[in-house]
Amino acid sequence: MIHTAALLFYIGAFALWVRFLWSGSRGRGPLLASVLALLGVVLHGTSLALFYLEHDELPLVGPGAALSSLAFVGGLALLVLLPLREVARVAIVLLPFVIVLQAVALAIGVRPAAAAIDFQGAGFILHVAFAFAGFQAFALACAAGTLYLIQFHELKTKRIGKIFRFTPPLATLDTLGRVGVWSGLVCLSLSLSLGWAWTLTYRDSLEITDPKVVWSVLSWFTFLGVVVARRLGDQPEYRGAVAAVLGFGVVVATFLVLRVTVGAEGLFL
């Protein structure tokens, strides 16, 4: 029930942000939307804490629980953005990602894992935390890149609309995208290192054929590709925005393909 309430608060916050966008407001920010997002995160965190107390298992293993935790990390990212004034407006693109993750988690069912996993303890928690932080940072880069491309197009066509008046300047969006990609690359590198250190120690293998490892490695190279795209040729900011949006799409599409073809067996999420 609390999981559902958190989702409703997220949806309400997004609806209010859309309203501010439609009205063309550039005031001190949609305060009520920020409050709803904050309440959603608080409820979300409470629901995950209750999950742990009830099942004596961190909500990181079962598909529904893991997706809900990933959505919660996105909610925490929102809280970091909200005090940053105009940067908080990037939430209008980032928040739908949180909503979709939480909605899918509820559809699947936030329940304990069907079977215990070998990799547990502090190392596992750090492994998952770095992975979640990495993918949410990439989602942030995608959100900033999406707004950058929209604003760039409006400037190029000289058709200044409400989105232009609502979103942060291009330079701010570019900085946010760059920070998101680099943070994602570092966090995912740490997550892979921890995971492989455990498998080499206890299984004497990198398990490179495991679907979740394939997806993680492909995601890492996608992150790296976005970083490289920002350093080649002219208009690195524009090219970086395009690469972030396309790269995030590749990561999500690959995950969905593996989920459909492989199923729940063998995949972390």
Image (cartoon, helix red, strand yellow):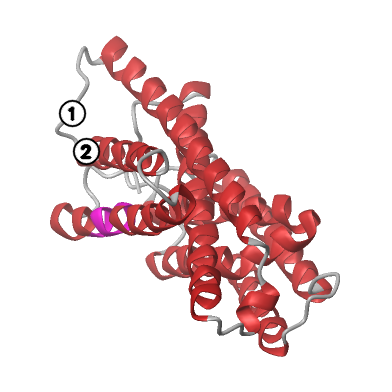
What residue is disc 1 on?
Answer: 208
Mark 2 residue element = helix
Identity of the amino acid at label 1? Ile
Mark 2 crowdedness (10 Å alpha carbons): few <14, some 14-19, many ≥20: some
Q: Residue at x 53, y 70 (%)?
A: 96
Q: Nearer the viewer, residue 243 or 38?
A: 243
Image location of residue 243, percent across then percent down: 37, 53
Secondary structure mostly taken by the magenta-highlighted segment of the chain: helix
Cα separation between marks 2 and 1: 6 Å
Horizontal side of 87 relative to 121 (left or right) equals right
Q: Quadrant of the N terminus?
A: bottom right
Q: Is residue 104 visible?
A: yes
Q: Earlier in the sequence, mark 2 or mark 1?
A: 1
The answer to if 163 sits in the magenta stretch is: no
Q: Residue at x 19, y 60 (%)?
A: 260
Q: Residue at x 69, y 54 (%)?
A: 46
Image location of residue 94, percent across then percent down: 56, 63
- Numbered circle sitting on residue 214: 2
The span picked out in magenta is 251-256
